[in-house]
Image (cartoon, helix red, strand yellow):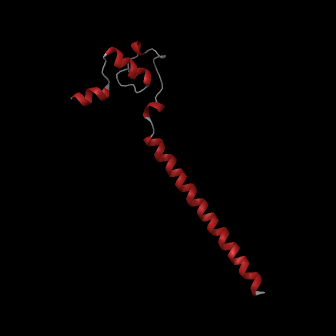
Amino acid sequence: MSETSAPKRDRRGFLRNLARGAVLAGLGAGGWFLLRGRRGDRAARHRCTGDGICRSCGSVSDCLLPQALSFRRATGARGKKERDRDG
């Protein structure tokens, strides 16, 4: 009988370790997604409020969207980063 009880303990231990590993992997993945979301590309989270027309938008100087960056470069308008850098 001792031969049949040993594999059950090994199987039980294996399944317990497998479950622990799955929980740890899930926690690690969840933490990674949370940190990634906070440090992600800020421009990807911005939404255009000016219907894509930067010239009439009130927040064009602080906008991080590529269209606003291009508009500021073309017109010489300065955004928040440029103002902070220049002092």
Residue at the image point whose x is 59% and y is 63% from the top: 21
- Quadrant holding the C terminus: top left
Residue at the image point whose x is 59% and y is 60% from the top: 23
In this view, 87 is above or below 16: above
Residue at the image point whose x is 35% and y is 16% from the top: 74
- Image coords of residue 1 (percent x, y): 78, 87
Residue at the image point whose x is 47% and y is 17% from the top: 52
Nearer to us in this view, 11 or 56 = 11
- Image coords of residue 80 (percent x, y): 31, 27
Q: Image check: 19 left or right of 3?
A: left
Q: Name the outermost residue toward the bottom.
A: 1
In this view, 68 is above or below 36: above
Name the quadrant containing residue 17.
bottom right
Name the quadrant containing residue 4.
bottom right
Nearer to us in this view, 7 or 37 = 7
Q: Image check: 2 left or right of 84?
A: right
Q: Image check: 8 left or right of 81?
A: right
- Image coords of residue 75 (percent x, y): 33, 14
Q: Name the outermost residue toward the left.
A: 87
